[in-house]
Image (cartoon, grey):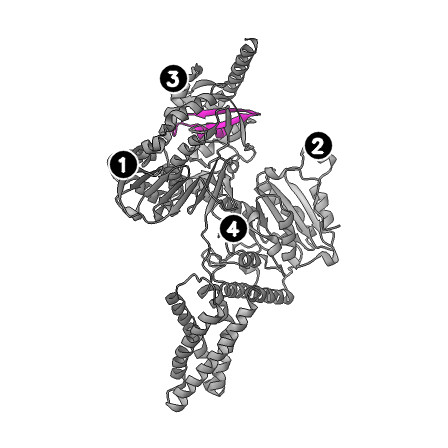
Amino acid sequence: MSSDLEFLSHDEIEAHAPALRADQLFLSIVVPTRNEADNIEPLLGRLRASLPARTFEVIFVDDSDDGTDLIIRKLGAQVVDAQIALVHRDGAERVGGLGGAVAEGLRVARAPWVCVMDADLQHPPEAVANLVARAKEDDVDIVVGSRFCADQATGLEVFGPVRTALSKVSAAAASLLFPRHLRKVTDPMSGFFMVRRKAVDVGALRPQGFKILLEILVRHPKLRPTEVPFEFAERLNGQTKASPREALRYLRQVLNLRFSGGPARFGRFGLVGISGLAVNTLVLALFSDVAGVWYLASAVLATQVSTLWNFALTEKWVFRGGTPRLGLAGRLTAFFAMNNVALLLRVPLLWVLVSGIGANHLVANVFSLLVLSVLRFGLSDSWIWSPRTEERLFNYDIHGIVTIASEGRLPELARFRVDAPIADPTITVRLGRLAERGVAAQELDGLTQLHYVEKFGNLGFGARFELGERSDITATPVLRWSPHVLYTNIVEPVLRWTFVQKGYALVHAACLSEGENAFLITARTDTGKTTTALKTLDQLPFSFLSDDLTLVTPDGRALTYPKPLTISRHTVSAVNTPQLTRTERLKLIVQSRLHSKSGRLFGLIIAKTGLPAATMNAYVQALVPPPKFQVDYLVPHAPVIPEANLRGMAIIQRDGDEGYEVLEHEEALTILLENCEDAYGFPPYPVIKHWLHSRNGLDLATKEREIITQALSGASTQLLRSPDRNWHRMFPEMVRRSVDASDSTQVREIAA
């Protein structure tokens, strides 16, 4: 069948560049095409030039009759750094127009994120990297390339004044009809966006024409959207597909989306409106014809009476049985506000009809009410009586060992994020108000209860902990806006000792692997682990497990714990292939100075003075977030692997002459544990750590030491001294020495 997915490669290409596995991909780019033969080659060329090689696939869904599919096949066989796929639809298979083509592409996409863009280069291929960068922050499900979210519309002059006006009007109309779904989207008509693949139920879509983004946003109200501005470019070749027919398709799509979910409710709303019309007309006649009040003043008074009548019937009959987001007073206020805003629109219309063309004021009143009835129902359904949304939690599953459900985003755990809700999480994190200030602890009914709230109370840093087999944490509301502090200062310390309860240890060390052999790199905070790891990955064929913390097991395995890397301008300059935008590089000038070793030392000094250091840290990081990036954004070609066998550990040190020194296990263990404690030096950890690892009679500190001792039993440890911080040049030799030492130990054991 011609609509089957076809990956474009042949034996010669496969021999040099095997087809990409799904787990290698971050991005699927879906490009619907109709008679775009001349645009395919420049599109592919610019995409390949602006995106990391072998991290994306391009899926063309082609409805062409001009041989576009032949061009795609030809070029696809020549491309070795990306996967090219084709779905060619013939005749009756071309269902749903451009929107149907996008839905087909979503069905076959393999990467976790899908970018949708046009083939005509009006969506600049270079702008895809900006969408990718925003998606990697992991607090959103859909990133919209917007023509309107900047200070002014960007690039719309290529449309001409008429089409530009139509674009703005259609976007405004959609926002009025779907205020809840589109409250964070300025450009719901955009055809350029990225969406998390698992967040979209393709089967729920009913695509018609161009506006697939609107379809996705309305049918998936729980999507978390954001926008990135882009400048619309001129079409390179071919002709636009916009037409009056597409305008009619858009109108039909909007009507279907707005009313298909509740035709019976719309019917009841219409009957209530008719009854309200009768009430409004009767009251208007009484005021104007009987009491002699001026007809415009009578219309205002009649609107208040009919609004109260309509509200009572709408509340009891139209939207009965639901749990609205707004309370009764809120619904009444909003309903009156809506009707009086509608009145402001009706008054000029009434004046034109009555005073301008001489229409009867009663007939004019009926006509004005009918004109606004559809808009009023849309606002009532989507805003005033919209149902209360379910609690939105961020869910994380760390190797099946520990699960977390959090009201606040935890960006350091982005790689462990899961879409499905977790029924019984190991750790639950909530954001709410705390009644007390200060520090307190008690043990009650098998739970250790801790309370740490700085002097600003709910306006500052604070948390309440209930620690047991299942732990509950409540953090002050301000930490919603400082997610890195929420994770690093509250969640991670609890995680450390929860892992120990489960028989694992979270050690302060980066971890790289050569094949199946893993090697830790540990040092005090801000010594140079990140730079060493990045330089090694950039220049040598190593794989990445972790940068800051590594999860180790008693049987000598290292499990990946890929937090985003905190980098400086110096660190970025150490690698050749970071995919940073110009804006991100400019931000680093401020971020790297503020979130540096000197900045951390200043914070620790403040903490010792008794000032609310954690509160200050939370506000600073909310205003200027730390410069954190995933490893594949900095070194795109470095593979991230789930686990490997521990064969060695490097302790990096700046003092002394360059050289290697083999350390005894006990000395190595002591240094590693000291480094682990150093990683948790910021408040509140120094104050609450005793209760974290000694709760309810447990001695988790001793257990952690035992786990790490067993994990390192088959690994050799070497001290790497380098006064010029060139540990990455020493690392391969350290790896060779560790493997040789490990092999020698195994030979002796066999001989014994």
Seen in the image, is 84 located left or right of residue 158?
Answer: right
Question: CB of mark 2 within 8 Å of CB of mark 1?
Answer: no
- Nearer to us of marks 1 and 3 is 1
Seen in the image, is 487 located left or right of residue 25?
Answer: left
Residue 150: x and y in percent read: 46, 55
Residue at position x 59%, y 54% from top? Answer: 122
Q: Secondary structure at mark 3?
A: loop
Residue hosting label 2: 15
Question: Of marks 1 and 3, which one's residue comes earlier in the chain?
Answer: 1
The segment highlighted magenta reads: 510-535
Amino acid found under the numbered disc labelled 4: Val
Residue at position x 28%, y 46% from top? Answer: 457
Residue at position x 74%, y 58% from top? Answer: 91
Residue hosting label 3: 656
CA separation in Å, label 4 and label 2: 36 Å
Question: Of marks 3 and 4, which one's residue comes earlier in the chain?
Answer: 4
In this rendering, the answer to whether 465 lies above or below 660 is: below
CA separation in Å, label 2 and label 1: 60 Å
Q: Secondary structure at mark 2?
A: helix
- Nearer to us of marks 3 and 4 is 4
Amino acid found under the numbered disc labelled 1: Ile
Residue hosting label 1: 606
Q: Quadrant of the C terminus?
A: top right
Residue 444: x and y in percent read: 32, 39
- Nearer to us of marks 3 and 2 is 2
Other residues around mark 2 within 10 Å, as few (<14) / some (14–19) / many (≥20)? few
